[in-house]
Every structure is written in structure tokens, then in C-alpha cells.
Amino acid sequence: MSKRGLTFPVSSPDPPFLFSKPGSLVSWLYNWSPRLTPGTGPGCSLHFVPMQWNHVYIDELPGHLNACYPDPDPECNGQPTILGFNEPELPDQSNMDVALAAAEWLRVIEPLRRQGVRAGSPGISSAPQGVTWLREFMEAIRSQGSDVDFYCLHWYGGANLGGFLWYYIWSTHHQLGPDKPVWITEFACTNWNQEDPIPKEEVENFCRESCKYLDTLDWVERYAWFGAMRPETIGNVGRWAAFLGDEGELTELGAWYRDCAE
């Protein structure tokens, strides 16, 4: 399976089949929720991975998993996999302290792991407090006999590949423990200035070169560029990072991400 995936908003007006033509390098998708995106999942070329964004309605997660993976045979719809809480260290994201996140993980997600579900860690931002939060979380759940199956990392920044993205993923993986693989579930080249974004050529080059590099790392299992959406949705990440145009058509970058390895 290709590592390449999509960050696809749950409210997107556009169909995911734009990324699933024969030969597509895009193999999976998530939408920041546990609810299956139509056109993905069982019987489709795009494997859907549910996310439990925060602890609200977490008791519904097993039911959503059954909808995403109706056949217990992994050969039919892939090994059941979930993504943990979204940037819990940030007040404007899932905003969960370690004690709450660990308690809900142990109560709901660890029993699913024991049934054979792979569970990705809470996805942390590249802000300094992110790795600190996740290390404390790991200590809390491991003290109770639990664990994660892979780490989920986010990164946004400028166009200097070696000085920013590469350093961050290597150093963070080392701090967390290189015994587990990594999913980079959000990343993009951005200056957070919607009116004056990083130039198109720099963003496209960053995406191409970073994807090629991530494909060479055996400890990076999957990655998902931000994002598979229109410029109006991508906001201050900058229009040149969007895989879809103003009318929902594939951009040059979106077509490259779907079709090209070089």
C-alpha cells in the first residue's frame, strides 16, 4: 500500500473519487471524525481511517468502527485502525489535558486494541508543548499496561526541507522512541499568511520533495498533506497548498500527488 493519504474535510462538497482513479498513489483518507466518508472504505480503493477527535461521544466509537470495517477479515477491508485525539495540547483544538486523554484512552481505546484494532497516538502539533504532552501521555497509559501502535505527528512551516520538516520528524521520533512507526497526519508548507502566501513554486517543490523523502523512510508508514480541499476551506495555510481549485477541480499539485512518485 502507498503511504500517501488525504486530509479530507467531513463537510467537503467534492467527491473523493477524484483521487482514486486506476494507478492512483493515494491509498487512504481521514476526515477528522469517526464517520465514514461516502465513497471510501469497504469495497473502495481509498481506505478510510476513522479519528476520535476528542472525548465527546467517544462511547460511539466502537459502532463507527463496525461501519468502517464490517468484515473481520483484514484482507477484505484492511486491519481496523483508528487515529487518536487531534492536537490535544492546543486550546483551540481538542484541548484535553493528559489525565483526561489517558483516562478515556484506557477506558475506550485500549479495549479496542485488545480486539486487534491498531490505534495511532493523539496527533500532536509541532509546537514545543506537543512532544512534551505526548511523552506524558505515553507514560500515563503505559503505567496502566496500554500503549499506542504508531505515533501521529503534524508539521507546518517554511520551505526549508532539511532545516524544518526533516529535523522535526527525526528529533521527535527519537524523543518518543524509535521502536514505533510514524504517521504524519498533517503537514504543509505555509507562512500562515492568506493574503501573501509562500509562492506557488516553492509550495509545490516542497510537497514533491518532502513526499519523495518520506517515501524513503521505513519508519514513516503513512503521510497526508494538508490538504484535499478548495482554497476557501484551506484558509490561512495558503491557496497553493490546496489539491482542489475554486470549482472543485484538481490543481496541478493535487494531480501530481495522486499520480506521480517523482
Image (spheres, grey):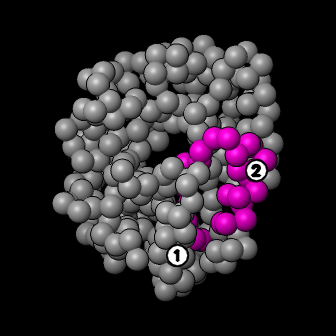
Q: Which residue is mark 1?
A: 209
| Residue at point 57%, 60% (across, down) | 217
Q: Earlier in the sequence, mark 2 or mark 1?
A: 2
Mark 2–mark 1 Cα distance, whole angstroms, equals 22 Å
Which of the two residues, 76 or 64, is positioned nearer the viewer here? 76
Q: Position of residue 219 (x, y in %)?
A: 59, 51
Name the kind of residue labelled 2 in the image.
His
Q: Which residue is mark 2?
A: 174
Give the quarter of the image for residue 150. Answer: top right
Which of the two residues, 24 or 154, is positioned nearer the viewer here? 24
Is 239 placed above or below 109 here?
Answer: below
Q: Tag 1's secondary structure?
A: helix
Which of the two residues, 69 or 188, is positioned nearer the viewer here? 69
| Residue at point 48%, 51% (across, down) | 222
Q: What is the magenta range?
A: 165-191
Q: Tag 2's secondary structure?
A: helix
Q: Position of residue 42 (x, y in %)?
A: 24, 35
Q: Position of residue 72 (x, y in %)?
A: 30, 21
| Residue at point 49%, 55% (across, down) | 223
Q: Is residue 208 visible?
A: yes
Q: Is residue 174 magenta?
A: yes
- Residue neighbourhood size for the residue with mark 1, other residues' Cα within 10 Å, grouped as few (<14), some (14–19), many (≥20): some
Name the kind of residue labelled 1 in the image.
Glu
| Residue at point 78%, 28% (across, down) | 139
- Residue neighbourhood size for the residue with mark 2, other residues' Cα within 10 Å, grouped as few (<14), some (14–19), many (≥20): few
